[in-house]
Image: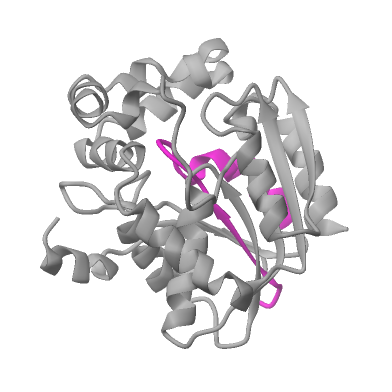
């Protein structure tokens, strides 16, 4: 992506699902890769009794369009920051539920807003199988981090589509769940974004911004929901979040896996209702 494309990344419009009364506090649900806000569909109705719930599709995912060459971490953070500007004002507070790469992307967006002079605080922050360690690197055996292999496997062979049931057990058990999530990966730009995230393109730069700015949006309450088995992130990612947010609480949930919104919706729904509605 050249500099002009990067400068114009904010011009792309994010699609978002919204539910609830606009006079209620804001709650953003930010998905990871290679999925979309579809994963939060069952949770929005439960949470809108107290919040105005907004669940956007990040650029190139779901119903959001984006550049043909896909997006890196900084691109997605810039686009999300532009989107958040339409919903927040200086000094306002939001609550967040962040899954997978939605964690660093959303915190990166808040860091960018802070650098622009728009300070947004966080009332409640729920991490769902995500990591925000600036020094994060995948396990050496994770094949998709290697550029040649990831381009071949993720972009050309669409391996995330046919291999989805390996990580999302509900996609193995339910044909419709599998079909829906596979449909999101028919878009080549989506697969290119997934590849660039696997390659950690602009991850270090994004997390450097988060490290410099997180105190400006330091959350009042933090909880970590950790579905296991978790093949990508590790206990180090939990420990890092606990180091940054010393008041964080956490739970490990057996058989919830990396996509707990689909593989154990009852457990995640229980946690989200308790955390956000109590």
Asked if residue 59 lies left or right of residue 57, the reply is left
Residue sitting at the far top: 173
Residue sitting at the far right: 278
Residue 121's place in the image compared with 102, above or below, is below
Residue 44's place in the image compared with 244, above or below, is above
- Membership of 10 in magenta stretch: no
Q: Position of residue 112 (x, y in %)?
A: 42, 73
Relative depth, front residue between 160 and 248: 248
Q: Residue at x 68, y 30 (%)?
A: 227
Quarter of the image with the C terminus is bottom right
Q: Residue at x 23, y 47 (%)?
A: 70
Asked if residue 228 lies left or right of residue 72, the reply is right
Where on the picture, by quarter, is residue 53?
bottom right
Q: How many marks?
A: 0
- Membership of 41 in magenta stretch: yes
Q: Residue at x 55, y 60 (%)?
A: 18
Asked if residue 210 lies left or right of residue 263, the reply is left
Colouring convention used in this rendered image of the protein: one colour
Residue 255's place in the image compared with 194, above or below, is above
Relative depth, front residue between 220 and 97: 220
Q: Which residues are magenta?
A: 23-47
Q: Position of residue 156 (x, y in %)?
A: 17, 24
Q: Position of residue 29 (x, y in %)?
A: 58, 54
Quarter of the image with the N terminus is bottom left
Q: Position of residue 155 (x, y in %)?
A: 21, 29
């Amino acid at each position: 992506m050249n500099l002009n494309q990067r400068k114009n990344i904010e011009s792309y419009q994010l699609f978002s699902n919204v539910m609830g009364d606009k006079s209620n506090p804001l709650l953003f649900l930010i998905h990871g890769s290679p999925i979309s806000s579809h994963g939060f569909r069952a949770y929005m109705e439960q949470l809108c009794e107290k919040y105005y719930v907004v669940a956007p599709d990040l650029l190139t995912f779901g119903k959001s369009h984006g550049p043909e060459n896909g997006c890196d971490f900084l691109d997605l953070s810039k686009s999300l920051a532009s989107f958040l500007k339409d919903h927040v004002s200086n000094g306002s507070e939001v609550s967040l539920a962040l899954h997978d790469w939605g964690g660093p992307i959303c915190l990166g967006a808040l860091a960018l807003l802070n650098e622009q002079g728009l300070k947004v605080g966080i009332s409640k922050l729920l991490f769902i199988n995500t990591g925000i360690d600036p020094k994060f690197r995948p396990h050496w055996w994770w094949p998709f981090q290697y550029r040649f292999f990831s381009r071949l496997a993720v972009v050309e062979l669409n391996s995330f589509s046919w291999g989805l049931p390996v990580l999302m057990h509900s996609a193995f058990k339910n044909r419709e769940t599998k079909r829906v999530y596979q449909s999101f990966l028919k878009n080549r730009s989506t697969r290119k974004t997934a590849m660039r995230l696997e390659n950690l393109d602009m991850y270090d730069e994004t997390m450097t911004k988060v490290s410099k700015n997180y105190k400006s949006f330091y959350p009042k309450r933090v909880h970590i929901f950790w579905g296991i088995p978790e093949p990508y992130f590790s206990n180090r990612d939990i420990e890092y979040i606990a180091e940054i947010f010393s008041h964080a609480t956490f739970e490990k949930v057996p058989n919830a896996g990396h996509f707990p919104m689909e593989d154990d919706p009852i457990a995640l729904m229980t946690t989200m209702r308790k955390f956000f509605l109590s």
